[in-house]
Image (spheres, helix red, strand yellow):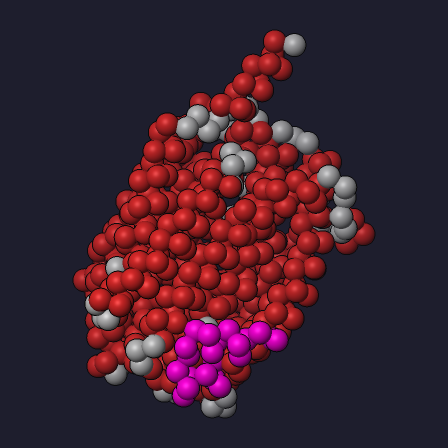
Amino acid sequence: MDATVNRRMLEGPIRKSILLFALPIFLSNLFQQLYNAADSLIVGNFVDESALAAVSSSGYLVFMLVGFFNGTALGASVVIARYFGAKDYESMQKAIHNLVALGVVFSAVATALGVLLTPAILRLMKTPADVLPLSITYFRIYSCGIVTVIFYNIAVGIMHAVGDSRHPLYYLIVSSVLNVLLDLLFIGVFHGGVGAAAFATVISQGVSAVLCFVQLMHGNAPNRVYFRKIGFTRGMTGQILRYGLPSGIQNSVIAIANLFVQSNINSFDTDAVAGCGSYAKIEGFAFLPVTCFASSLATFVGQNLGAKQFDRVKKGVRFGVICSISMAECIGVIIFVAAPLLVRLFNDSPAVIEYGVLQSRTESLFYFLLAFAHCVAGICRGAGRPIVPMAIMFGFWCVVRVVYIDIVLQFIPQIQMIFWAYPLTWGLSCIVFLIYLLKADWMYHFEKRDRRAKQT
């Protein structure tokens, strides 16, 4: 992996550049989703509905714990991409090693919070009594290995920032296969239950993190990690947090809102928790084009703005958004049609299938809205404006979503009303994102700064 190869996002045909970067991310996300679904599939088929509900009910709690730093790392990778585009490798090295140092701090904090606060949070979420002990076991074990998740995502952010989306794919394939094999061994053979599923996940994530850092700590690429350089640098830490924290906060507030949604789902029954948890795993496949193009656009915009290639940025943005919403909607149609078969893969209980199909067919045809929102958020991150998507998503995906559910359930206490909260808030946020994308001159300060530099 050398600098010449990694600079393909800055050179050549725009469509080819974006697709060659996005495809490995798409495949990585596919294996990541299979990785995440493995626990639910195997637990749901080898144990029972309560065990499936325990793994499912922990999903949003996992995202809340991991999402903050993952969002921070994603935002920070834009700083690395910008320096890479400008060929300022010295500053790029400082950014990389500050990010790794932040990972050490965040890992310690996340582990402590996960272990200590898990019971209280799950009770606040109204987790059913028969599911609660299993959920606590699963999430506490997962929390003890949270460092592996954080450092894997740091490594991926560093690699993506310089245009390398292939190596994370290779390592994720290895860990995904390992996770399935360990799940089958621990649960299918040794009958270990949800705790064994959590152990399998932690071990597999640890393998992927180690492989990523072995790659980053060898060779002469500009994104190489040196153990002796890990630490904080005055100015650079603040810059990383300025770009990264809004994305981390964005993930956290969405996770908190989803915890509120999950608590309302938990108030129905165990079948509802298991059915909606099964749908959440299925929905993850719709996120594949969403996240791959959002990540690609953030890197593409960041690198090309650093290289002052403004026309290339505008053309790439149009192409990426169109691809993302088209692919997401195609997957949505497939999920709408095949929902009964897909939910049955996780559990064959008629009640579980009924809840999962109901949620699938309420939300799946609106995935194009989800894709558009995340793409614009990626564009904003790449342009150094992460506060914009944070504010919009906080307003609609958190405040409006929570208020809507709280009011509507008082008049129509049906679970489908909870499901409608998602397409409703996606749509409202997309209206604001579209106005911002069309009306706000989000590249103005970069072009203005370039004109001033040429004049002097």
Magenta segment's dominant SS is helix
The residue sitting at the right extreme is 228
- Please give the name of the residue rendered at 57% of the width and 18% of the height, measured from the top-left corner: 450
Judge by depth and name the residue closer to the eye, 15 or 36. Answer: 36
Quarter where residue 274 is shown: bottom left
Quarter where residue 204 is shown: bottom right
Above or below, 230 against 315 in this view is below
Does residue 234 show up magenta in the picture?
Answer: no
Percent from the top left, x then y, of residue 248?
A: 54, 52
The residue sitting at the bottom extreme is 190
Above or below, 38 against 297 in this view is below
Percent from the top left, x then y, of residue 202?
A: 57, 72
Percent from the top left, x then y, of residue 50?
A: 38, 85
The residue sitting at the top extreme is 455
Does residue 132 show up magenta in the picture?
Answer: yes
- Please give the name of the residue rendered at 67% of the width and 50% of the height, measured from the top-left corner: 99
Above or below, 423 against 322 in this view is below
Judge by depth and name the residue closer to the eye, 343 or 268. Answer: 268
- Please give the name of the residue rendered at 42% of the width and 44% of the height, measured from the top-left corner: 392
Task: Write the start and end of the magenta stretch as one range.
Answer: 115-135
Figure quadrant of the C terminus: top right
Percent from the top left, x then y, of residue 60?
A: 45, 66
Q: In the image, 289: left or right of 109?
A: left
Q: In the image, 456: left or right of 319?
A: right
Figure quadrant of the N terminus: top right
Query: Is residue 22 among what the camera can see?
Result: no
- Please give the name of the residue rendered at 71% of the width and 41% of the height, measured from the top-left corner: 236
